[in-house]
Amino acid sequence: MATVADTKWIEGRAKALGFDLCGVVAAQKFPELEHYQGWLDRGYGGEMKYLEDPRRQNPSGVMQGARSVIVCGLNYNTRHPYSTEGVSAPKISGTPKGWISRYAWGDDYHEVMWKKLNALAGALPERFAGQLESRAYADTGPIAERIAAKYAGLGWLGKNTLLLNEELGSWLFLGVILSSLELTPSLAGELPSSDLCGNCRQCLDACPTGALGEPYILDARRCISYLTIELRGPIPEEFREAMGWQVYGCDICQDVCPFNRNPPTSGTVEFQPRGLGTTKSLLEPSLRWLANLDEPGFRELFRGSAMKRAKWKGLVRNACIALGNAEFDGESGDRRKILRRLEELCGHEDAGIAVSAEWAVSRIQRKRT
């Protein structure tokens, strides 16, 4: 078995590659995973069938011969306001703006993380002799990264179900390397970080759709991130108004978290907002611009972006709903142009777009009377 010094070497190399956090844990079935099947049985995973992969319940089943999990965290917070600061939906005055989740402002984090993880995996032979096997996942495999991160000493699981670190908050991308090496765990005999959420329930109370009905349990079917990214077709009407200006993902439960009040920011160029300062910025983008995007334009704009996940139909659908929640300044030209575009989309062959456009037109016209 490798030594404590070997684990420290891995953690040091990870930091040298730009990771903010790194820890090691044995490949095992973590206690939280005992409740995973029950969570699925309650339907909380929605249409995300990939979550039903049985390998998710034990990392040792993901790679034959896996003995250890190296967990890395990368801070993606940037020096820009939170979605809960200043103007927010449903009262968006002037030119209607949308909100894109912080993690998707820049380049695709999967690629950024995977490159660093593979560099770390490629460095292991420098320290460890003999044959070894490694496999890196950047939110791309059947691994419960946040749970592994807890037992690797990177933080605790907050009431919003995300990993929280006392110094860095929750603006963290997580990735893992499964290794055939039998490494000494970073916590080696120590308990994971204490749960510091205490009596706080700000994340639960702030969720506009009630996705966090009870602490530490997420009903994805009600989560705005799920609704705007994973769900195909029309969004249930009961959630549309509560979505406000969210067009891709949602940051609210992180924005209100006390541990995210003043966390460190990242200087990683890839995580800065694309098009910042232009009419095509991903930081509070124009909803009119998004609603007018065609499919080729979407593919070109979001090449190398995590936002590909929503697909063109999903993003236009979401923009329609956000426009239905917007407030306009009187009979502005912008309002008339937006209504014309929405009326065009009412006849779209995709039900998700058509239904959302019809809902938005009805809302805008009703507000005028």
Image (cartoon, rainbow, N blue to C red):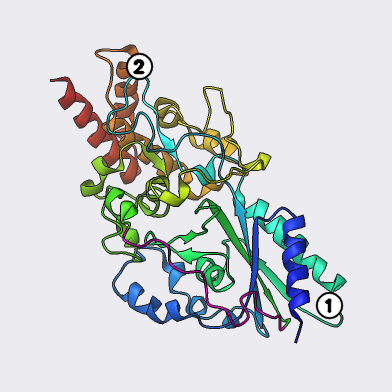
Q: Secondary structure at mark 1?
A: loop
Residue 301 shown left or right of residue 354 in the figure: right
| Tag 2 residue | 334
| Tag 1 residue | 128
Residue 251 in percent (x, y) is at: 42, 46
Residue 48 in percent (x, y) is at: 41, 64
Report the magenta residues as a range.
182-199
Of residues 353 and 73, which is closer to you in this image?
73
Q: Quadrant of the C terminus?
A: top left
Q: Earlier in the sequence, mark 2 or mark 1?
A: 1
Question: Label 1 amino acid?
Answer: Phe
Question: Label 2 amino acid?
Answer: Asp
Residue 54 in percent (x, y) is at: 48, 79
Disc 1: CA contacts within 10 A as few (<14), some (14-19) or many (>=20): few
Of residues 192 and 344, which is closer to you in this image?
192
Residue 100 shown left or right of residue 8 in the figure: left
Q: CA distance from mark 2 to mark 1?
A: 63 Å
Compared with residue 271, is residue 342 higher up or lower down, i.e. above or below? above
Compared with residue 262, is residue 21 higher up or lower down, i.e. above or below? below
Q: Secondary structure at mark 2?
A: helix
**Residue 189 painted magenta:** yes
Of residues 211 and 164, which is closer to you in this image?
164
